[in-house]
Image (tube, grey):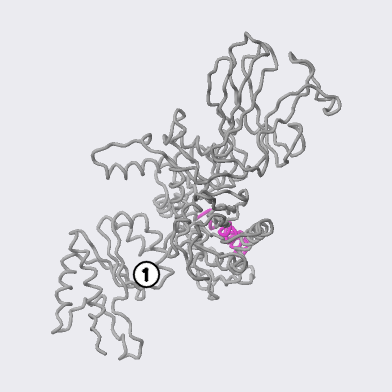
Amino acid sequence: MASKRRKPPKDDAIEHALKGTDKTNVLEVKYVNFLKGRGPLVYSREQLLGLKDSALMHVERPVIPAEIHRKGRGCRRGRKRRRWLPSVILANVRSISNKTEELAALTRHQRAYRECGLMCFNSRAQTACERIHSTVTQTQMGHPRALLLITAFGYEAKAAYLDMGEEANRSYFFRDFKMQLYGQKITKDLTIKDVNQKPMNALKVFSAALKFIKEDALTTINDHCSDLELVASDFRWVLTVPAIWDVPARQFMREAAEQAGIVSTSSPEKLVIALEPEGASVWCRKLPSEGFISEFSKKSNISQAPGTRYIVVDCGGGTIDITVHEVLQGGALKELHRASGNDKGGQHVDRQFKECLREFFSGGQWDTYEKDHPSEAQKLLSDFGIAKQFASKPKPLKLTADNKLGLIIQSNNSFKQMEGLEWVDGRIVISRDKMVSFFQDSLEHIEQSVGGIFAKHEKIDYILLVGGFAQCKILREMISNKFSDKAKVLCPTHPQEVVMKGALVFGRDQSVISSRKSAYTYGVDTSLPFDPIQHKPEKKITNDCGVVCKDIFEKLVEIDEDVEWDQTREFNFSPSNKDQTSCLFHFYRTKSPSPTYIDDCGVEDTVASCEVPMPNTSKGLDREIKLKIFFGATEIKAEVTDVESKSTVSAKIDFITQ
């Protein structure tokens, strides 16, 4: 049977690349020969067109530039036949500047990129492209949470810091600073530390980061809208936070957004706080089967049938958030299990590696290196952060260290014998078992949490792995091995993107999450007529209302109670003194379902407060205040109505202490 003869591979590749050159006069082609250690070679459009003319003439041998001609290849030298130009990679100006770090990581760890024949970018991407070929990427695939106050953000901050050398000690470089809010008591003067342990006001750091994002977004949008000049108030902004973040941390992010000029206090509805696992859940339901990795099972997507249940395991850089959703009639989602988790995300693996280095290079060698050469130390740690995503095979991982670390080690010549970790010719060699040990804390937490959910909920159809940490093959393999017999394990092909995309959907329609579980029992302090049988004697006081029992915990919502997304709770109160001109509400919370007093064991001291004016005292005690609480959203809000004047105000519940 006859078949159509294909063009030679080199003609195919060159012709493919040339289709792009006809669209612009500023296109450059870079050929990277990593095998021979050469840097990128740049060709002008005219040179490439000349190559086209010679390559398409079949009557004579094409003229191949000497610098890219590899001799001694092919069957004549007893080697397997390989394509002369293995692949062509094309990228436009807008994508390459944002994908520089990802492309560099792919170049190091994936053969198709490492042995690419042609990389085509337009001229504005030249600087970014040079960085790819001169060094390996410095951060993980997702946008790095790095901030160089106040001159650069993200990849630019990272690159600037790595180029500083000794000057890095005199600069502020904040990396992964978001997680410094986890588990902290949020106060107005909270400080966080940069990588060199120098403190700075946390609100200043976060507002600077959000301000950069705001200005970058507005600049990009206005570049595409020449007839309009849009400002921040023209948009609704969506800010994602981990689900296990406490309410004070969410309020802190709102205040940082206000300082950054994203939203004003007069229009708080312009900012929506979205929980990261909820955003991922919303978007993954929209993905087809091709949108999921199929390394462990046949391709599948999430069923939309009512009653479908799935566990969302959001494995981020900082946190691991785990919750359970059920699909309701009409397509909305119900939270079946309140969010749980901890700070054992991808950064915890990096910290474990760093502690291992500190132990391996004994005698304080690593501390000396990190103090004297902070940018070089950050580069090594960042290389590990990328490499851990691809570590899965038995073959050991090898990280090339900076020469300065080698000199320190040579001068001391002190190592601690450690199984699975070696120093070989300027490289750190890590065995697979040692690499898995860095993941152990994170894996054990996920296994225990997911196992507990299966014990509590009988029918679970899927386990959904999302977040940048889910890119790590070691993590995906463990979860699949442990739970694939109980539920189908799914991971999107781009797990780090689904949170952002789902958050946009949530920002437009918050009813997509129909109800949530209350994380605490919330209440306010009030007083009741004293009952000697029920009340403690020490709680007995006398005021204008008579003999009352103080410090009563008036329950507003109970832990694990289902709260609809738009549901409100209404409570009636009256003043305790005739001439009272304001009413101060103190809010408390506990993990106990039914506390009696605000000072019972397990009840946290005042977590929030709000004050409401009551200027008209003509009716004395015969006045009424209606407190309306919104518990179902991602933030707790209150609305207070003075029944006498019929005026309604939005009361700010302040969860941040002074």
Vertical relation: 6 (above or below) 246: below
Type of amino acid at the residue the image marks with label 1: Tyr
Residue range of the region highlighted in magenta in the rendering: 348-372
Vertical relation: 560 (above or below) 58: above
Residue 552 image point, x, y percent = 74, 28
Q: Residue at x 60, y 55 (%)?
A: 344
Q: Which of the two residues, 524 or 409, is positioned nearer the viewer here?
A: 524
Q: Quadrant of residue 522?
A: top right
Q: Which of the two residues, 138 or 229, is positioned nearer the viewer here?
A: 229
Residue 645 image point, x, y percent = 55, 15
Residue 195 visible in the snapshot: no
Q: Element under label 1?
A: helix
237 lies left or right of 428 = left
Residue beneath disc 1:
113
Residue 215 visible in the snapshot: yes
- Sort mark 1 into few (<14), some (14-19) or many (20+) by Cα contacts within 10 Å: many
Which image quadrant: the C terminus? top right
576 lies left or right of 129 = right
Vertical relation: 74 (above or below) 422: below
Q: Is residue 208 magenta?
A: no
Residue 167 image point, x, y percent = 44, 49
Residue 533 image point, x, y percent = 86, 27
Q: Which of the two residues, 346 or 2, is positioned nearer the viewer here?
A: 2
Q: Is residue 352 magenta?
A: yes
